[in-house]
């Protein structure tokens, strides 16, 4: 049975001190929550202290990116080895902002996914169509291309360790959420692609999160859908109270 995972994506927000303060509050707010995975994607500068801040709790820490090499002459980049060494467990990969502003391709994201897995980090692979894709009827095609590209070459055993986050780009930071029905339809289509790639059994095991303006007041309806197994939450993950409400909507 796949696991419900609610992950926060802080993006380029919070100093180290802000991160620790929020996590200290969140720890208390979600204490005792057992059947939902809780993950916070903090900026690189806050990761080390974030891991320490959540020690002994049910919260795991994610990086928001990584470079797919152990070490080397890659100025400004951070490696999976460095993330592992400080206790980071998840890594968000292929977020639409990285695809858009940093020109990340499916092939590059695929390298990152494989590399993350080889270090025992759990990749959260983000996929999602832009508004013009949806309007042109290309939603399923775009998601299929990104899922197939991002997960190319993985074994079934590796694939079940990946979390997929479906985030329609038109719903990110816009306040426009896909209706639960629209989101469910796309999640189903994504699971079908996963079944084609790795078999129906593996596809049933893979957590597919929804992301894009998830808030405390819409989380329950989204998470009630059969193929929506969690959320990747941007804006509403910045405050402990609102994020804890979303986590609890997944219980
Ligand atoms: P949002 O961001 O919740 O602020 O729309 C989601 C994301 O980009 O992961």
Image (cartoon, helix red, strand yellow):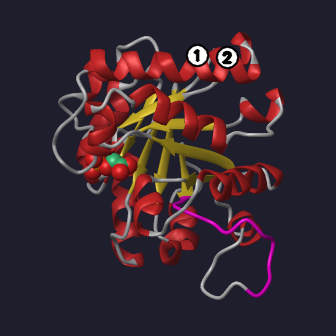
Answer whether residue 205 is visible to the viewer in this image. no
Where is residue 45 drawn, in percent x and y?
50, 78
Using the image as rendered, state which of residue 84 and residue 24 is in the foreground. Answer: 84
- Percent coordinates x, y for residue 248 in the rendering: 34, 29
In this orientation, which residue lies closer to the viewer: 9 or 50? 9
Q: Nearer the viewer, residue 182 or 10?
A: 182
Name the residue located 44 percent from the left edge and 30 percent from the top edge.
Answer: 230
**Which segment is the magenta one?**
63-73
Q: Main secondary structure of the magenta part?
A: loop
Rendering quarter of residue 65:
bottom right
**Quarter of the image where the C terminus is located:** top left
- Where disc 2 sits, the SS reads helix
Q: Is residue 44 left or right of residue 153?
A: left
* Residue placed under numbered mark 2 in the picture: 195
Q: Are marks 1 and 2 in contact (CB under 8 Å)?
A: yes
37 in relation to 18, above or below: above
Left or right: 5 as drawn, with respect to 214? right
Does residue 126 appear in the picture of this structure?
yes
Count how many numbered circles sit on residues in the image.
2
**Residue identifier under label 1:** 192
Residue name at image x 57 percent, y 24 percent: 3
Residue at point 52%, 56% (across, down): 54
Asked whether mark 1 and ligand 1 are closer than 8 Å, the reply comes as: no
Query: Would the CB of label 2 be found within 8 Å of ligand 1?
Result: no
Percent of width and height locating residue 4: 50, 26
Q: Residue 57 at x, y = what percent?
A: 54, 47
Asked whether 217 or 51 is in front, the reply is: 217
Task: Point out the image quarter for the N terminus.
Answer: top right
Q: Distance from label 1 to label 2 (Cα)?
A: 5 Å
Q: Is residue 65 magenta?
A: yes
């Amino acid at each position: 049975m796949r696991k419900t995972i609610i992950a926060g994506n802080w993006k380029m927000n919070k100093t180290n001190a802000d991160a620790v303060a929020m996590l200290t509050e969140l720890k208390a707010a979600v204490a005792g929550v057992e059947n939902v995975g809780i993950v916070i994607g903090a900026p690189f500068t806050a990761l080390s202290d974030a891991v320490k801040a959540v020690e002994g709790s049910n919260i795991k820490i994610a990086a928001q990116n990584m470079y797919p090499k152990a070490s080397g002459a890659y100025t400004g980049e951070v490696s999976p080895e460095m993330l592992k060494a400080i206790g980071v467990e998840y890594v968000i990969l292929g977020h639409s902002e990285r695809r858009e502003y940093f020109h990340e391709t499916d092939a590059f994201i695929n390298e990152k996914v494989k590399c993350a897995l080889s270090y025992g980090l759990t990749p959260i692979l983000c996929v999602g169509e832009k508004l013009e894709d949806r309007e042109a009827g290309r939603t399923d095609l775009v998601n299929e291309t990104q899922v197939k590209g991002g997960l190319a070459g993985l074994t079934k055993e590796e694939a079940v360790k990946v979390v997929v986050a479906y985030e329609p780009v038109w719903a990110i930071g816009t306040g426009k959420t896909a209706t639960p029905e629209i989101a469910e339809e796309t999640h189903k289509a994504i699971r079908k692609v996963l079944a084609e790639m790795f078999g129906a059994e593996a596809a049933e095991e893979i957590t597919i999160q929804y992301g894009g303006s998830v808030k405390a007041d819409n989380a329950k309806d989204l998470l009630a859908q059969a193929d929506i197994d969690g959320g990747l939450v941007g804006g509403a993950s910045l405050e402990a109270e609102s994020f804890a409400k979303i986590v609890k909507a997944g219980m």
